[in-house]
Amino acid sequence: MSYYSSSSSTLYSSSAADLWDPEVVLGLTNRATFGPSCIGHAKTYSRRCQRYIAQHKTAHGRGIINRLARGTASEAAESPDLSRAVDILLCWQHTGQSSSIHRQWKTKLEDWAAENEVDDQSSATLSDWGSRRGSSSDSDSDSDPDTDPDIDGRSPDEESHTERGSTGELPSEDLRRMMKILQARLEAQLRRERERQEEEKRKAEEEKRKAKEEEERRRREERRREEERRKEEERKKREEKAREEAFRERVRLAKEKQQREAKEKAEKEAASWRVSWKRYHHAWHTTSTELSEVDIPWPVKSGLRSDVNEANIKLFFMKAPPEELRNSGEKIFKFINKETKRWHTDKVMQRFGEDVANGKAKSALDTIAKVLIELRKDAKLKR
């Protein structure tokens, strides 16, 4: 039998005088580290603690246990030194387990005592009784009833009865001792059964508690995830709302910009049309008598003969005239009718001369007359 001392590399052999082996009964050596370590239980890892204890503390604690091993296990279970040894062999993190480990060690010692010390005591009692009975028989065989005098005056029958009472049956003191031993064994068995039932109950309660904690943890986790989902949905809604508001704002600004640019463009275009109309109107009202092709006020926005075509002519008479000349069907007809007469071939010849009317500008003049006749027809229908 051997167990470790304070140093994991040094082995102590239990003394022959030891009545029980601390390594066998208490399991001092940590099988995971093959040496001494804290005797506490690491609940996080569900195993024995692997933290080493200071060498002087280990030596001190093991020394106490060695001294207890020289006495009986039952005496060690009741000794206050057992609690001291437990306190010494625990690391700082597991000092709170001192009471529970002391109870475990005490139970292990009591169980070992019940299994071993009771059998030893029973064997000793029976052996002692057998020895005394054998000695009495030898004494009777050596004496001769015919020659030995009756020393105390008792009759042979009385003496024989006394001897049977003292040697033929188990003495009452030994019987009480045997009964006490059997009772101790029974109590140990009952205690172990109670402890087994209590351990099963404790395990069942522990499993129930763990199941309850796990259920509570699961519910908390579910509530946490639900809260996170809710917050995530709210965040997404806020972001979506912000994006929509930003988009609407961009659309509004773009629309305002577009409207502003369109308005500015329209105003700029209207101003350019007003300039074109002013030039056109002024040219018709000049009093100069020497007019040439260059002086013809072409009814297009640019005022150039090169831009004269049906589309530009129609656009000019739609955009250039002032509002008061085209704000009703009747006014439009009167205005177009006046322009048609102005651009009639005879009127053009009278104003610009036959050479101009039949010269290079003849094609452009014919186009203007033709377009105005069409515009007069449309205006007449809408008057």
Image: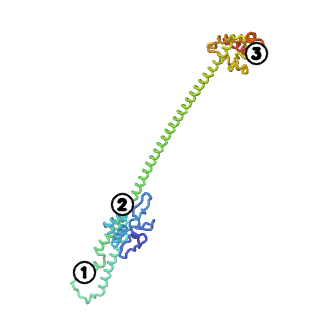
Question: What is the crowding at mark 3: few (fewer than 14 residues within 10 Å), some, or many (at least 20)?
Answer: some
Q: Residue furthest bottom?
A: 147
Residue 352 appears left or right of 86: right
Residue at the (36%, 59%) spot, across then down: 96
Residue at the (73%, 21%) spot, across then down: 306
- Report the front residue among 118 and 19: 19
Q: CA distance from mark 1 to mark 3?
A: 181 Å
Kind of residue sitting beneath label 1: Glu
**Which numbered disc flags the more N-terminal residue, 2 or 3?**
2
**Which numbered disc flags the more N-terminal residue, 1 or 3?**
1
Q: Residue 162, image x and y in percent?
A: 26, 79
Give the labeled residue for mark 2: 95
Quadrant of the rendered image containing residue 147 = bottom left
Q: Residue 66, image x and y in percent?
A: 35, 71
Kind of residue sitting beneath label 3: Asp
Residue 366 disc label: 3
Quadrant of the rendered image containing residue 165 = bottom left
Residue 293 vertical placement versus 167 (above, below): above
- Report the front residue among 253 and 96: 253
Q: CA distance from mark 2 to mark 3?
A: 120 Å
Question: What is the crowding at mark 2: few (fewer than 14 residues within 10 Å), some, or many (at least 20)?
Answer: some
Q: Secondary structure at mark 2?
A: helix
Q: Residue 7, image x and y in percent?
A: 41, 70
Residue 302 appears left or right of 79: right
Give the labeled residue for mark 1: 158
- Report the front residue among 279 and 22: 279
Circle nearer the viewer, 2 or 1 = 2
